[in-house]
Amino acid sequence: MRSREASVAVAAVALGFGSTWWNVVSITVRRRVVPAELLGRVTAVYRMVAF
């Protein structure tokens, strides 16, 4: 049973790092690609779709 708990903990840590990495990369790409005057609207749509 301990190995299952350890694998769940490892998976949780990996998902945490993965989601943090995804947020940093997606925000960076969005800020570089989208014109400044549309950035707020694009970010709002991204958040609405994500939730």
Image: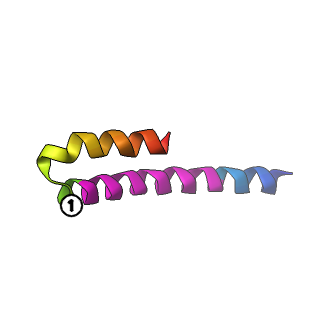
Furthest toward the left, the residue is 36
Vertical relation: 32 (above or below) 12? below
Find residue 33 and report its horizontal and vertical position in percent.
21, 60
Task: Judge left or right: residue 43 versus residue 13.
Answer: left
Residue positioned 33% across, 39% down in the render: 44
Residue positioned 80% across, 54% down in the render: 4
Secondary structure character of the magenta stretch overall:
helix
Find residue 22 and report its horizontal and vertical position in percent.
41, 56
Task: Judge left or right: residue 37 versus residue 40.
Answer: left
Q: Nearer the viewer, residue 13 or 20?
A: 20
Q: Nearer the viewer, residue 36 or 29?
A: 36
* Labels in figure, total: 1
Q: Which residues are magenta?
A: 10-30
Residue with the mark numbered 1: 33
Q: Is residue 20 magenta?
A: yes
Residue positioned 56% across, 57% down in the render: 14
Task: Judge left or right: residue 50 versus residue 15.
Answer: left
Vertical relation: 19 (above or below) 47? below
Find residue 19 and report its horizontal and vertical position in percent.
47, 52
Find residue 50 and report its horizontal and vertical position in percent.
47, 44
How many neighbours does mark 1 have within 10 angstroms: few (below 14), some (14-19), or many (20 or more)?
few
**What is the three-letter code of the residue carrying label 1?**
Val
Furthest toward the right, the residue is 1
Q: Is residue 22 magenta?
A: yes
Q: Secondary structure at mark 1?
A: helix
Q: Nearer the viewer, residue 46 or 3?
A: 46
Asked which colour scheme the image uses, the reply is rainbow
Residue positioned 18% across, 59% down in the render: 32
Task: Judge left or right: residue 44 versus residue 13.
Answer: left
